[in-house]
Amino acid sequence: KDMAGWFAEFFETLQPTAGELLSLQEEIMKIFTSSYTKPVNIMLQQLKNIATEEGFRYQEFIERTTSLFFSSPKNALLTLYSIFEKIVAQHPEMKEPCCITLCQLFLKKDESLQKKAANFISKYGNVSSSKLQETLQSYQPEILQSAQAILASFKPQSAEPHLAEEANATEDILHTICREDNRIPFPADKEDFLFQLSRLFDMEENWEIETTIAAIIAFHPQLDKEDLNRMEPIFQRAANMVANSWEPYEDLLATFLLEYQRLWAQTDNSNTGVLRNMFTRLEEKLKGIDKNRGAYDERSFKRLADWKPGYSNATCFTPIQQLWLNVIRQIKGGNSLPLLSTPTHTPAYLQATELIRRLAVYQEAGKKPCSWDFQLAIARCAMEDKEEAIVTARQLLHDEYLHLCLFLLDENTQPEPPYNHPTAWVAAGLVKAPETEFKAFKSFSCNTLPHNHLTGNYEWKEVKPKENSYETDRRLLQLDFHKWHKYIERNSHQLWQEHLIINSKYNMDDSRYMEPLLCCYPNRPEPLIAQIISNYMAFGTPQEDSKRTLACALRMLLSFHCPLKEMSLLLLSGSLLFVDKTVRSYAAELWVEGLTAGRINNRRVGEILARLINMELAPLKRFTTQVYESMYKRSAFHNHQLEELLTVFISGLPDKPVTGLKQLLELYLELLTINRSKVTNEQLLQRLQEWATNSNLKKVTTSLNKL
C-alpha cells in the first residue's frame, strides 16, 4: 500500500503534460482496478485535467469507472462527478450514458452525493427516456427524500420485465466497434516512427507493437545511415534480450528485430563495421564463453526462421513467427505493400472497408498476400457497417477477392470458386458462421481437424488431481481433443487455430503474451479461451500466473464485442467462483457489460454456475458476496437479468442445502421484492418446499413462497 501510494505521488510530482497524459490513458485506467484508494484518486485528478482535450477516451472512461462507484471514498466520487460534467459539456450525445452511470451514487447514504446525482440527471436527463426512468425506478428504495424532490419531473414508471430489447438499443454509442476515439494512429513521419521503434520493448499494448512492425515496411526505404546509428540502442537491447530473456514472446520480438538489423549489417561497409562486430560479440558470448548458461546455449541467437521457444515445443507462436518472416522478406525484396492484418481500432479490430482497400492494393500490384497475414486480417475484421463495406468491395475488388469479401460480409452469400486462398476462406467461415461446416471447404488440404477444434466448441467436465501427483488443484476442464502426438499428425499446420492446442501449461505461461494471442481472435476467441481454462482455471490455491492470466482473458473479453459462446461462458462462470477477488470483479463487470450489449446467454450462465457448485469446486459464499458488491442494483434491466440468473442457478442446486444457501436465498428475496416479482418456476417452487423442512431455511423459504 505504501509503495503504491509513493509511486502515485511521484507520478503527480512529475507534473505530466496533457500530451503525456493522453498517451498514457490505457495505463492510467488500468489503475482503476487497484484495491488502494490513493492511486485511484490521483489518477482521477490527472484525467480530470484532460477531460476536455481532444483525444480523451471518454466512452472508455465511462465504461471503466463503473466499478469505482462501489469502492471509492467521497472525494474520488466528487472527482468522477466533475469529469462527467466535462464530458457532457464537450459531447452532448453522452448525456444519457452519463446520467445512467451516475445513478449509482444513489446507493450512497450521503445526501450531498445523492443531490449532486439528482441535479445532474435533472439538468441533462431526458424526461421521456424510458431507459432512464427504468434505471431510476430500480434505485427508488435507496433515493433520499431531498433527491426524490429534485427528480419529481421524471415520474419513473413501474419497471417491466421485458427490458432486453430497449437496453440493447440504448447504448449503441458505447458498443460501436470502430470509433474515432479508439482509432489506432500510424506514425505520421520518419521521426515519429523512429521514436516509436525506440519504445518497442516498453509497449504495453499489442496493437502498438504491431503498428510499429507494419511501419518498418512503410518507412524502411526512407532511412539512411544516420537513422541507423539512432537505432543502434534498440538493436543492442534486442541482443541483450536474446542473450538473457526467458519469455518466448519477448524473445521472438527481439529475434525479429535482430533479423531486421541483419539487413542493415549486409550493407554496413564503414571502417568500424559496428553492426557486424555486434553480431560477432553476441555469437561468441552465446557459443559457450558464458559457461553459466550451460545446456541452454543451444537456444542462443538463431535466425528468425530457426526460432523456437526456449524450453518447449509449443507452436502457438509459429503463425506470428511466419508473419514476421514475411515482413523481413518484403523489406529485403523492396516490397512496401501494407500488411493486411494491422489493426485500425483498439484493441485488435480491423475496419472492413480498410481491409478491402488494402486488398485492392495487392490486387492492383498483382501480388499474393501472405497466408498468415490474410487469415489474421479476416479474423480481426470488425463485423459492422457491412452495407458500406459491401459497396466498397464491389467498387474496388473483383474475382476471388470480391467473392471472398462478399461471403464474409453478406449473410446470404455462399462460397464461390476459385479457391486460391483456401486458408483465408476457412478463416472467413469461422468468423461468419463458426457452427457451420461449409461443404465447399471439406476438400481443402488445410481442413484436416474435427471442426470443433477450430471453433473451440468442446465438451467439458471436472478434472480431479491424480493420485501421487504434485498437482493438488482440482481443474475445471479436460479438453476432449486427441492425444498430443495424434493431434500433431492430423494437423495441416496451415491454419492459425491449429497452432493453439497446447499440451502443457508451461508452453503458454501467463498474460505477458496471452494478450497478443487473444488479439488474434477478437471475433471468435473460443479456441484460446478453452486452453486458458484448461491450463489456469484451478480450484484450490492458484499460482500468481493463473490469477494474471484469467484476469487478462476476462479483460480482453470485456474489450471485445463478440457474443460469448460456451467456453467464454464457462470462463465467466468459473471466474465468478474463483478465489481471487480481482478475477471475480472482472467476471462481474463482463456479466454486466455483456448483458447490456446482448452478448451473453444469461440462462446458460445460471446452468453452468449450478453445475460448478454441484461439483463442490468452490464455496457458494464467494458468488453471493460478488453479486452484492458489483452485480446487484446496477439498473432495472440488470436486476431483472439477475433474477433470471438466480432462478436458474438456485433451481439447479443440490437437493441437500449447500453451505451459504441461506444468504443466497435472502438476496433472491430482496431482488424479487425490488422487481415486484414472485417465484413462478415449478422446479424452484419444489426446491423451496423441500428446503422449508430445514430449520435454518424455513423463514426465508416461507417468505419467498408468500410473495
Image (cartoon, helix red, strand yellow):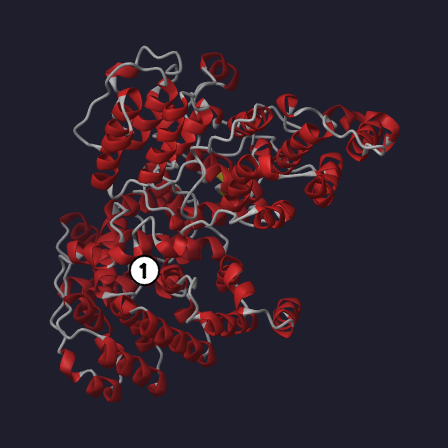
Identity of the residue drawn at 36% across and 32% down = 378
Give the side of residue 654 with respect to residue 528, left or right.
left
Residue closest to the eye, 44 or 94:
94
Q: Position of residue 414 (x, y in %)?
A: 20, 23
Give the side of residue 316 with respect to residue 276, left or right.
left
Quarter of the view holding residue 269: top right
Q: Position of residue 97 (x, y in %)?
A: 28, 66
For the N terminus, the image quarter is bottom right
Q: Position of residue 299 (x, y in %)?
A: 72, 26
Q: Is residue 469 above or below residue 108?
A: above
Q: Position of residue 675 (x, y in %)?
A: 18, 66
Give the side of residue 206 with respect to residue 559, left or right.
right
Quarter of the view holding residue 278: top right
Identity of the residue drawn at 29% across and 20% down = 400
Residue closest to the eye, 541 or 436:
436
Tally the numbered discs.
1
Kindly state the secondary structure of the residue where label 1 is placed.
helix
Circle 1 crowding by C-alpha within 10 Å: few under 14, some 14–19, many from 20: many
Quarter of the view holding residue 305: top right
Q: Is residue 182 visible?
A: yes
Q: Is residue 588 visible?
A: no
User: In this figure, which residue is indicated by the disc labeled 1?
Assistant: 664
Q: Amino acid at mark 1?
A: Leu
Q: Is residue 208 above or below residue 288?
A: below
Residue closest to the eye, 275 or 490:
275
For the C terminus, the image quarter is bottom left
